Every structure is written in C-alpha cells, then in structure tokens.
C-alpha cells in the first residue's frame, strides 16, 4: 500500500508534468533529461507514467523525432500555464520565507529606545526598505 501511495504522490505527479513540459519544449527526451539533470530513461518513464495515468498518448515517438499528439497539444495548452503559475507561487513563497514578515510589538522602558532600539530599527529599515513601517506609539 505504501508503494502505491508513493506512485501517486503530489511530488511524483509534479515530476511527471515537468518532464512532459520539457520534452514538449525541446521535442527531445535527451535534451529534456539534460535540462532536468536526469537520464533520458527517467524522462521516458515519467512521460509513460503520465500517459498511463491520464489515459492518453501525448507524444508520437520515432527513432528520429518526438512530436505531440492532439491529446498532447491539448494537455500542453492547459498544463503549461498551470505549471508556470505553480512555479511562480513557489518562488513567491520562498522569497517571503527568507524575509522577515508579520507584526512585531515591543514593550520596553523608554530609556532603552535611544540606546538599543533606534540603532536596531534604523539598521532593519535600511535592510528591508520595501516594508512600510507604521509610526511608533509611545505610552502616554
């Protein structure tokens, strides 16, 4: 049962689609494999697995060329924009994960502000200019 779950994992499905997109772009299993850093056999197996999973042949293969079938053309027209959006979403999330985010509230004695906080906040503001910083309120 575990093996069956691994075959249909989201990561494995993503690799199959990435392999399909690369073969469709290059019209070559060898060039797609080089781009993705895997063997041509691995790309071929991924595409075959995708074809089996969706129930349609996506490529016409000869010893000299690789072309898309009508099903492959239709799949490409829908899968490519969706995959590009997923990649872009991952990049945005990764960028946000590498930067500070969220609200930080500090409650400190006034004497600490000029000595410790002002230099730290000034340094932070310079490093992360794209963050808008609200006006600091001082207790009254």
Image (cartoon, rainbow, N blue to C red):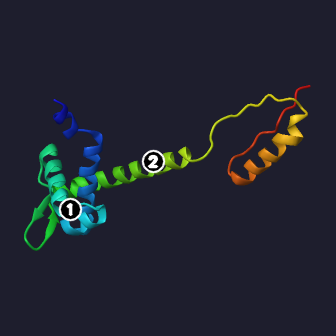
Q: Compare marks 1 and 2 and give the one earlier in the sequence.
A: 1
Q: Nearer the viewer, residue 41 or 131?
A: 41
Tell me the quarter of the image containing the C terminus: top right
Above or below for 67 versus 91 = below
Badge 2 is on which residue?
A: 89
Identify the residue at image location x=29%, y=51%. 79
Residue at (25% x, 39% y) in the render: 9
Compared with 126, 66 (above or below) is below
User: How far is disc 1 from disc 2 in space, using C-alphas?
Assistant: 28 Å
Along the viewing direction, whichever of 99 and 80 lies nearer the viewer: 99
Q: Give the percent coordinates (x, y) of residue 93.
A: 50, 45
Secondary structure type for disc 2:
helix
Dividing the picture into quadrants, the one containing residue 53 is top left
Residue 5, horizontal then vertical, whole percent: 21, 34
Residue in the picture at 63% in, 43% down: 100
The answer to whether any part of residue 6 appears in the image is yes
Residue in the image at 44% along x and 48% along y: 90
Quadrant in the picture for residue 72: bottom left
Number of numbered discs present? 2
Q: Is residue 45 above or below residue 109?
A: below
In the rendered structure, the answer to whether residue 31 lies left or right of residue 60 reads right
């Amino acid at each position: 049962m575990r093996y069956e779950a691994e075959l249909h994992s989201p990561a494995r499905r993503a690799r199959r689609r990435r392999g399909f997109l690369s073969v469709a772009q290059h019209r070559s299993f060898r060039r797609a494999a080089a781009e993705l850093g895997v063997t041509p056999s691995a790309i071929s197996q991924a595409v075959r697995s995708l074809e089996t999973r969706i129930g349609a042949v996506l490529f016409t293969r000869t010893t000299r060329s690789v072309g898309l079938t009508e099903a492959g053309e239709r799949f490409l027209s829908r899968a490519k924009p969706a995959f590009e959006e997923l990649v872009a979403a991952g990049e945005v999330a990764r960028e946000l994960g590498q930067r500070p985010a969220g609200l930080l509230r500090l409650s400190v004695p006034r004497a600490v502000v000029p000595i410790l906080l002002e230099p730290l906040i000034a340094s932070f503001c310079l490093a992360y200019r794209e963050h808008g910083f609200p006006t600091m309120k001082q207790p009254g």
